[in-house]
Image (cartoon, coloured by chain):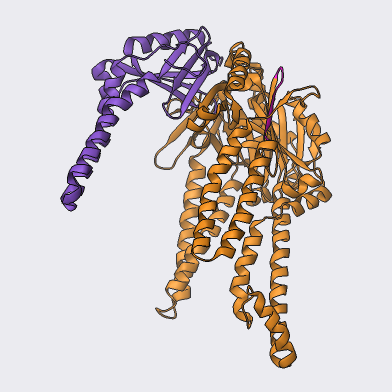
Chain colours: A purple, B orange
Amino acid sequence: MDDMQGETLSRVHPDHVKVLRIQSFGLAAAAVLAALAIGEGLPVLRWYALALAVLFALFWIIRLPARRYAHKGYDMAPDRLRIARGLLFRSDTVVPFGRIQHIDVMQGPLERFFGLATLVVHTAGTHNASVSLAGLKRETADAMREEIRSHIKRQTL
Amino acid sequence: MTQVERDVQSIPAGEGQRTSPLGFVVQALESVRKAILPVIAVLFGTRQIGDWGLELGIAIGLIIITLNAGVAWLGWTRRRYFVGPEDIRVESGIISREARSIPYERIQDVSLEQKLLPRLFGLTTIRFETGAGGKDELELSYVTYEEGESLRELVRERREAGPGQPFAYDSKSEAASGPGPEEADDPVLPQESGRLLFAMDPKRLLLFGLFEFSLVIFAVLLGMMQQVEFLLPFDLWDSENWVALRSLWRDNEQVAADAVVSLTVTLIIMAGVLSLGIVTGLARTFARDWAFRLERTSRGFRRRRGLFTRTDVVMPVHRVQAASIDTGILRRLFGWHGLTFISLAQDSGSASHVVAPFARMAEIWPIAREAGLEPPSADLAWHRPKADRWFALGVIAAIPVLAGAIFLAVERHWVWGVLLACLGLPLIALRQYYAWKRHRHALGPRQLFVREGWITPELVMVQRVKLQSVEIACGPLGRWLGYGTLHFGLAGGKLSIPGIPLGEAFAIRDSILTSIAGVDFSDLPR
């Protein structure tokens, strides 16, 4: 995990790459279809357009999710959660447990298939009102939620 | 955080009370105002049909008013509120009933708002804020001002007392002890008169109004000049015409006299628009900030202002998240500034509360101190961000300008091309330079200060513990030049430091996080 600060961060589950790949399938398919359409209209360009589209699709489906995965990391310190992500535009967010208002563990259909989950922590801030960390193993996400919850004091009435 | 429950508890039989019957009158009158537009539309629509257009319009207007008044009356009869031992309950709705209860502990704030019409009747809208914002707040309109005040007092005392304490509430006796309705024009409070922190007299307001002159009016002015151009016998924008006008004067006195008349008319119109701009600014300021009073009461800051719509907002001190001191291009030269509190509460749609719109710095700091915010100490080290960011962004902004200039030169409009380059590029350079130069930040032991704005500098200050999260964002340009943007999670506002060297960003984050993590959100000073 190459990190702006040089600390080691934990990675999310490798199956996250598969989810990302399946999610990026739509746009890649659209690119290939567009290339086919261009080929119909301008037969001269047919093979160039198709080759370009296939290259883009391969990059989009195979290379990009792997890079995005490699750049995603988190760190559970005793009193704070740190989440780093982003390939071109990197962001590195730290949320102290004491400022977390509530926690969600969410699972989309794809994530459920792979047994993954997304952890979302909500803060009172306008910026970073909710910070999400996708690609965690369901058990890990649940454990993290419990861990964070044990640190949050019960809101006084 | 909000615990507004619907349809769970209802008012015990025989208990509860109605809102003020005068409120029905106000709602009926408001429906008359709403009916005016449809009636005018009908009048216009039926003009061609025949002679009975007017009668039809009036009939439709009457139907709308009667219907609205009927609905208002039904709504009034079906609306009851109950001040319980643990919560405030409101039942309302004509066909579908809604019962809402808010426990006292969840009520963050009680605000009173008096629009012009209700104000004439001594009525007010009372809003119980739970922090949910907007639709989920409990709103009760209209109650008498005294009833609103006593409800507000009650909620506060109830919150202070905590649950389970015996509590008696009798609205009639409280209302009787309050001020009479003839004093409703300038509501004075018997229960709580706080320490005055800031007030604006009409003289100050007049000066403030002059500075509130909107720049938009200049755009209107230019637009108008294009509109009235047809009055002139020549093109206003072509300098050659002005030379021609002089020769015309010599040659033909009649035509010249016409031109002078048109020119005078134009100038008069322009002067009219200008004074209209000043008057609009003054009127807006007077309407909004008339009799501005900021007080420090035992419960927090209390602000009252407004000529037609009088608002009365109380903000507990602990809900102030940050403060910002801003100014304007002109007023800055005369040393006038404004203080705004950033909080979670809503103030007519914005999360910031203006607590001193037009004041001297010497008046501002005592108010900020009341909110626990100290001015930056003299030995505080201020840091500038990395100039690379502004330089790089300036270069990027210069590219299209340069391209445009080259294009013009190639198209043989080389004068315009040179002009564009000579005007545009220095302007960008100047802007970027000042944007960088005016940006600065300082990290005190308890507070963070961020100053930005290239024409009108704004200083935002916040207590470290009131920050919610810290993010360091870094784009491709920033990675190349080694800077990032530090974003802080601030409840009710945004705070960020752009163009900060990455190493410093991480150092600031670590320092602030140790301050934050030491204090739990629930333990923040209340």
Instruction: Report the front residue among A65 and B194.
Output: A65
Q: Is residue B441 rendered magenta in the image?
A: yes
Instruction: Report the front residue among B170 and A82.
Output: A82
Decide if residue B310 is on the left or right side of residue B81. Answer: right
Residue B297 appears in the picture as rendered: no
Instruction: Report the front residue among B151 and A20.
Output: A20
Q: Quadrant of the C terminus of chain B?
A: top right
Q: Position of residue B55 (x, y in %)?
A: 47, 73
Q: Is residue B128 rendered magenta in the image?
A: no
| Residue stretch rendered in magenta on the structure | B439-446
Q: Position of residue A31 (x, y in %)?
A: 25, 40
Which residue is drawn at the image coordinates 69% and 66% (left, top)? B273
Q: Which quadrant of the structure image shows residue B435?
A: top right
Q: Is residue B307 above or below residue B149?
A: below
Residue A89 appears in the picture as rendered: yes
Q: Position of residue A65 (x, y in %)?
A: 32, 25
Question: Tag count in the figure?
Answer: 0
Which residue is drawn at the image coordinates 45% and 8% (left, top)? A147
